[in-house]
Amino acid sequence: MQYKCKNCGGNVLFDPDSQKMVCAQCSSENSQDIISGNLESCPNCGAPLEITDKTTSSKCNYCGSYLIFDNHLQNDFLPNLVLPFKISKNKVRDLINENFGKRIFVPDNFLNYKSLEKIEGVYVPFYLYDYLSHCTLEAVGIKDRSWRQGDYIVTEHRHYQISRDLDIPFHKVPVDGSKVLDDAKMSLVEPYDYDQLLSFDTQFLSGFFSDQADFEKGDLETLAQEKARDFAKIILNRSVSGYTRIVKNREEIDCANIDSYYALMPMWIYRYSFMEKEYDIFINGQNGKIIGEIPIDKKKVFIYFSLFFIVLALIIGLGLSLAGAL
């Protein structure tokens, strides 16, 4: 399917700045008509589409039209929630320039307009889990106190019985359902503000790329439960304070899964090729947080340090000449 403008026939896309559907051609707002059908070729130019069975939204490589494959948005892979893009492509360009514009060793074309046009918005599939954690703790808290009494150091140990029985709810514990980023890098792109999640609508996909999750909901439930358990343990331990030390006799944390959601999170990706290596810059599509590896032009490094040592040698030589004259 595709969103086309009823006024001019242009491609209507979701605009992060206005949070509205805007025609890419005539700039009219909310003027979209839905053109439905199972797409095997581009409905605008007829070119073959480079997609897979997991593609849910993409762009024609020939005419640039954005398309949505709603036949891949079904059953377990129909999202419940979506966090729409809040940061536009133009803003992402500015953020990349602000972050890397003063790096003197990056390649000359790393920040030019043509290279930055390669930036694409991608929705990353997540699974979000709700848990109710029941936590119990039986322990002994010990308070130590020492003082001098004559020639002796007296130490007092007071023992206190500690008992905790807590129910701790956790809402929307996130687990990345994609292989676009490994878990370590994805945790650096986070956090997202889940309070701004909306009910899913295919309109949010228009103008962006997305794929089905690489995992099913049940595959990642153990990871989410471990996260909830770790959070619960932190809260449980913080409920006990003021003791020199604590001896735990029993600690139990049970996490019951209450609900789960399939959700899409926004991320901008800038892929840059240099010296037969791919460099990826990832930008959180909600708050603009940037992570990634930048390329280093070794020729620039060589020229910079060569000039530095030449200038240094001239300064030293001049200094020695002046010293000899004196």
Image: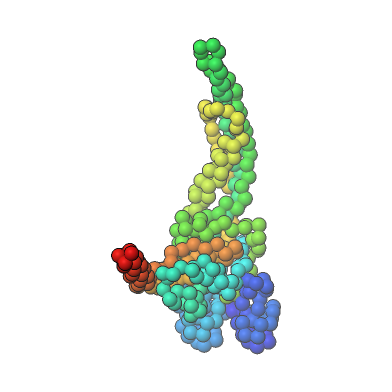
Total labels: the figure holds: 0
On the image, the x and y values in percent for residue 301 come to 36, 69
Whether residue 311 is visible: yes
Please report the residue visible at 48 percent of the width from the left and 80 percent of the height from the top: 114
In the image as oriented, which residue stretches furthest toward the top? Answer: 150
Please identify the quadrant where the C terminus is shown: bottom left
Q: Residue 237: horizontal and vertical position, in percent? A: 57, 36
- The quarter of the picture where the N terminus appears is bottom right
Q: Residue 36's x, y, as percent? A: 60, 79
Residue beneath the point at 49% across and 50% down: 223
Q: Position of residue 229 (x, y in %)?
A: 54, 43
Q: Is residue 258 above or below residue 139?
A: below
Q: Residue furthest front?
A: 326
Describe residue 200's horizontal placement relative to residue 57 as left or right.
right
Asked whether 123 or 110 is in front, the reply is 110
Q: Is residue 79 visible?
A: no
- 307, 319: nearer the viewer: 319
Visual colour scheme = rainbow
> At 61% across and 82% down in the image, what residue appears?
24
| Quarter of the image where one finds residue 277 | bottom left
User: Position of 304 compared to 284: left or right?
Assistant: left
Dividing the picture into quadrants, the one containing residue 179 is bottom left
Task: Report the residue at 47% width, 56% height from top.
Answer: 183
User: For residue 240, what is the image quadrant?
Assistant: top right
Can you name the residue that lies furthest to the left here?
324
